[in-house]
Image (tube, rainbow, N blue to C red):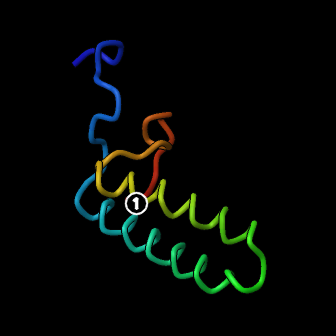
Amino acid sequence: MDPITKPHFAPNITRTGRWVRGGIAALLFIGAAATFPIHWALTAVLGVMGAFVLFESLRGWCVLRACRIRTPF
């Protein structure tokens, strides 16, 4: 398919990449929960990052790969 007509958020990672991103999202959410009593802004940043990485995992789409940056998974 032509890159110009390629649909937005078209899957661009493998099953392994999805699992890796899911694990990273879980770690970010755990980090957000752990920092909740310490600093609310850090908790918010980690939570938003975790939500975005979870979206990538569930959708099978990676923002870096969409920008033509190669990632290992």
Depth check: give the residue in front, 47 or 26.
47
Image location of residue 46, percent across then percent down = 62, 67
Image location of residue 34, percent across then percent down = 62, 86
Depth check: give the residue in front, 70 or 17.
17
Other-residue count near label 1 (Cα within 10 Å), few / some / many at <14 / 14–19 / ≥20: many
Q: Secondary structure at mark 1?
A: helix
Q: How many marks?
A: 1
Image location of residue 20, percent across then percent down = 37, 68
- Label 1 belongs to which residue? 54
Residue 4 relative to residue 31: left or right: left
Quarter the C terminus occupies? bottom left
Where residue 41 sits, quadrant-wise, is: bottom right
* Amino acid bearing label 1: Leu
In the image, residue 73 above or below residue 28: above
Residue at the image point whose x is 57% and y is 59% from the top: 49
Depth check: give the residue in front, 2 or 28.
28
Depth check: give the residue in front, 68 or 32.
32
Residue at the image point whose x is 40% and y is 74% from the top: 23
Residue at the image point whose x is 38% and y is 52% from the top: 56
Residue 71 relative to residue 46: left or right: left
Quarter the N terminus occupies? top left
Residue at the image point whose x is 35% and y is 13% from the top: 4
Residue 54 relative to residue 2: left or right: right
